[in-house]
Image (cartoon, rainbow, N blue to C red):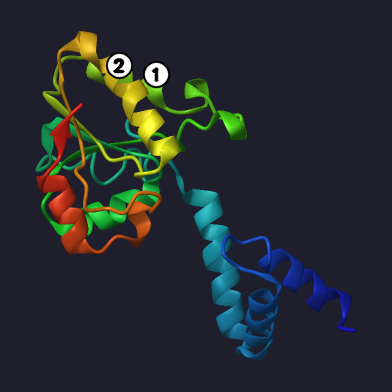
């Protein structure tokens, strides 16, 4: 029906999360109508991000520098770490402007059904950071779903012998929801009402 290059573009766009076949088709036609210079800018931005963005060796956030903007910022509270599942979860927390500490990105959550155990996450690196003795509190901000809760409990169990205050963001976030979709007020209340676990 369409040229193979158009079908290929639709198929690649449909692989993006949240993009079904119809949306992929709309995006493909939008891109085809876009001036060549604009489409080229998009392709160059994707290539540049893939070529330059790496994981921070300290917290595993995304960065295009030696360390990420949080780990390298002397203004951040070095005694606190907020633990999140994915780098995208940092954005809504930062939007609250209530948290000034450091982060640790697990790069997922424990999910035996998906074959993801603690070994596949950045938990070992977290414990290594905590053993250095500078951290006084960790805030577990994993998503309020079964996988996020399992991950939070697993981390709390590992941290207990280190005698570091371990808190979990409070309710206010819907169970089964993702941090990515939470508004600033809800997330701010969740941070304020966190409880020790």
Q: Position of residue 70 (x, y in %)?
A: 23, 43
Disc 2: which residue:
157
Q: Quadrant of residue 84?
A: top left
Label at residue 124: 1
Q: Is residue 47 above or below residue 132?
A: below
Q: Position of residue 175 (x, y in %)?
A: 35, 49
Q: Residue furthest top?
A: 161
Residue at image point 57% right, 67% down: 44
Residue at image point 39% right, 40% down: 85
Q: Is residue 96 above or below residue 89?
A: below
Q: Position of residue 187 (x, y in %)?
A: 21, 55
Of badges 2 and 1, nearer the viewer stands 2
SS at badge 2: helix
Label at residue 79: none
What's the CA distance linking mark 2 and mark 1? 13 Å
Label 2 with label 1: CB-CB less than 8 Å: no
**From this viewpoint, is residue 57 visible?**
no
Q: Is residue 53 above or below residue 71?
A: below
Please give left or right for residue 177 compared with residue 110 in the image. Answer: left
In the picture, the quarter occupied by the N terminus is bottom right
Residue at image point 34% right, 44% down: 144
Q: Position of residue 118 (x, y in %)?
A: 47, 23
Please give left or right for residue 101 compared with residue 93 in the image. Answer: left
Residue at image point 75% right, 67% down: 11
| Residue closer to the observer: 190 or 92 | 190
Q: Is residue 12 above or below residue 144?
A: below
């Amino acid at each position: 029906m369409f040229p193979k290059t158009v079908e290929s573009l639709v198929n690649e766009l449909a692989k993006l999360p949240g993009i079904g076949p119809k949306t992929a088709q709309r995006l493909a036609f939008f891109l085809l109508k876009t001036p060549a210079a604009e489409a080229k800018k998009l392709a160059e931005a994707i290539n540049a991000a893939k070529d330059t963005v790496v994981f921070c060796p300290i917290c595993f956030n995304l960065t295009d520098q030696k360390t990420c903007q949080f780990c390298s910022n002397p203004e951040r509270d070095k005694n606190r770490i907020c633990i999140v599942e994915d780098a995208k979860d940092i954005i809504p927390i930062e939007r609250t402007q209530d948290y000034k500490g450091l982060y640790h990105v697990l790069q997922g959550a424990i999910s035996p059904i998906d074959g993801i155990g603690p070994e596949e996450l950045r938990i070992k690196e977290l414990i290594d950071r905590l053993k250095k003795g500078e951290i006084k509190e960790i805030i577990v901000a994993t998503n309020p779903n079964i996988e996020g809760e399992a991950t939070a409990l697993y981390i709390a169990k590992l941290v207990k012998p280190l005698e570091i205050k371990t808190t979990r963001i409070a309710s206010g976030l819907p169970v089964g929801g993702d941090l990515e979709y939470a508004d600033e007020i809800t997330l701010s209340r969740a941070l304020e009402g966190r409880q020790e676990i």
